[in-house]
Structures are given as C-alpha cells and as structure tokens.
Amino acid sequence: MFDLDELRRIRAEEPGRVAHALRDRRRRSLLDGDGRLFIVAADHPARGALGVGGRSGAMASRVDLLERLVAALGRPGVDGVLGTPDIVEDLALLGALDGKIVVGSMNRGGLQGATFEMDDRFTAYDVPALTRDGIDLAKLLVRINLGDPATAPTLEASAAAVTAAAEARIPIMLEPFMSFWEQGRVRTDLTADAVIRSIAIATGLGNTSAYSWLKLPVVPDMERVAEASTLPTLLLGGDPTTGPDETFASWQDALTLPGIRGLVVGRTLLYPDDDDVAGAVDTAAAMVHPRAVAGRA
C-alpha cells in the first residue's frame, strides 16, 4: 500500500518534487523485446467521464483509482500508463513509473455531456511540457463530426500538435472517431467504414506523419481497418459493453493483424465486474506479451 498522506504532504509543501520525480524516474526505450506495448489508460476523468458501464461514479475516488493503477502497473507485461498531468504526477510521486512508458494525454476540453463536447480543446499536456517531463508518447483525441463546426478548429489544432510533436521527435498517438449528435449527445460510428474514414483523415494531419501512431477501436471487419494505414497501431478498450470473455476474444483476434502492436485499455481492466484488477490485467498482458508473461509466471 502506498503512502497517501505523504503524497498529499508533498503536493502541499514540496510541489517542486513533482518535476524531480518525473525527471529522475528510470526510463526505458519505447519498444523493448517483442516490439509490442500494453498501456493502461486513465485519462477519462479529465474529460468528466467518471462512469464505467452502469456505474456512474466508478472513477470518482482518486484514491481508489490510484490504488487500481498502482496494482495494474505492478503486473508483469504492463508497459506503462496513459494519463493527464495530475494522474501522471501522482503516480510519479508514488514511484510507480520507474521503467514504465508514460503517455501524455493532450486534449481533454470536450467535456462529456457538454453542449460544447465536440470542441476537443487542448487543455492538458502540450509539446513543451511533454519534453520538460520526459514523457515518452503523446496522445490526442480526434473526433470528426461533419455536422458540427467545432470539428474544423479541432482538426487544425490537432495538425499543429502532430507537427510540433514530430519536431520534438516525440511519437504521437491519434485516436480518431467519426462522431455525430443524437438527441443532444455525441455518439460514435463504430462501423468499419466509419473507422477507415476517420483513419484517412487523422493520418493526414500535420506536416509529417513520421512520428504518428494510431489508437483504434476493435470493430467488426478489423481486417479492412488494419489495411487502412501503415502507421503503428494500438487497440483501445473503451467502456465495456459486452461480457469479459467476448471482449477479450475480440482483442485476441485483432492483435494478430498486421500493424497492430498492442493494447491501450483503461476502464475494462481497472474496473472489471468482479473487481479483480490483477486477473483482468494479467489476461490482457498475456495477449500482448505471451512469451514474456509466460516466462515470468
């Protein structure tokens, strides 16, 4: 168990230690060994998305979330974490990021349920901060709504972020969706054709794609989706809508496709139905790094 009182004391009395914790952590190369990545995602709260399945406030407790993240990061085969600065800094102060890949989330301004939700402004990491903190990989959300004018400035800002990340030689992971409004809520089109169209738009952002990656949902007909780009791609887990066996099976199949290099999963693994975080994480890790995980068992 980590020392939450000490974490709070440091934040109140020694805020300068945040920078030292990030700068002094033990680093690793982005792709070790088998060239695949398993990242645990935790950037949902910054967009006001605290629900998991039918549990509306599952992610409301920061203490509980940190306990789950520390448990997940301690399991064999987990390469790192995706988060906004507040999450990343808590984990750094807890010593949970040594030897881990850190993915910095950039645009969280399109708050869940807001009238301005499609305006995915950059409110978290920017490229200078990613460089300052030694963040290994950037991530940005690219929701494309052909019926909402907020999409245009979001695409422009996303293109600028891709260009700036490439200039800093920081890999940047694009998470594109074709989105639409339905009864006042933003919905996502998860057909293969829609995902393929979103890929075509997202991969053209910026003045170079040399450092661009993709983060894509697992949808029916993933073979066609995998053929839509040559960029390295990680699969996202999303909010669980099916049982764990069906969800894991869909990931397993998609991980065999060309260009797919691993998983970025958050709520499905951090808040499984049985609350066995270690068990859920171990199952996913074995899919991404079967030899490495088996060798440590």
Image (cartoon, rainbow, N blue to C red):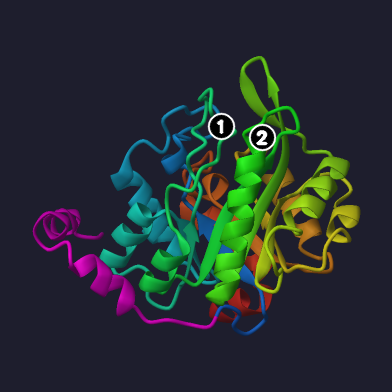
In the image, what residue occupies the spot 24% across and 60% down?
2
Q: Is residue 1 left or right of residue 273?
A: left
In magenta segment, residue 228: no
Q: Residues within 10 Å of mark 2 (few under 14, many from 20)?
A: few
| Horizontal and vertical percent position of residue 100 | 45, 73
Give the quarter of the figure containing the N terminus.
Answer: bottom left
- Asked where in the image residue 5 lies, by quadrant, the reply is bottom left
Q: Is residue 181 left or right of residue 141?
A: right
Q: Are marks 2 and 1 in contact (CB under 8 Å)?
A: yes
Dot 2 falls on a residue whose secondary structure is loop
User: Of all residues shown, which one is farthest toward the top?
Assistant: 183
Q: What residue did someone put label 1 on?
A: 53
Q: What residue did someone put label 2 on?
A: 241
| Horizontal and vertical percent position of residue 267 | 53, 45
| Horizontal and vertical percent position of residue 43 | 47, 49
Q: In this rendered view, identify the residue nearer to me: 242 or 52.
A: 52
In the image, what residue occupies the spot 52% across and 36% down?
110
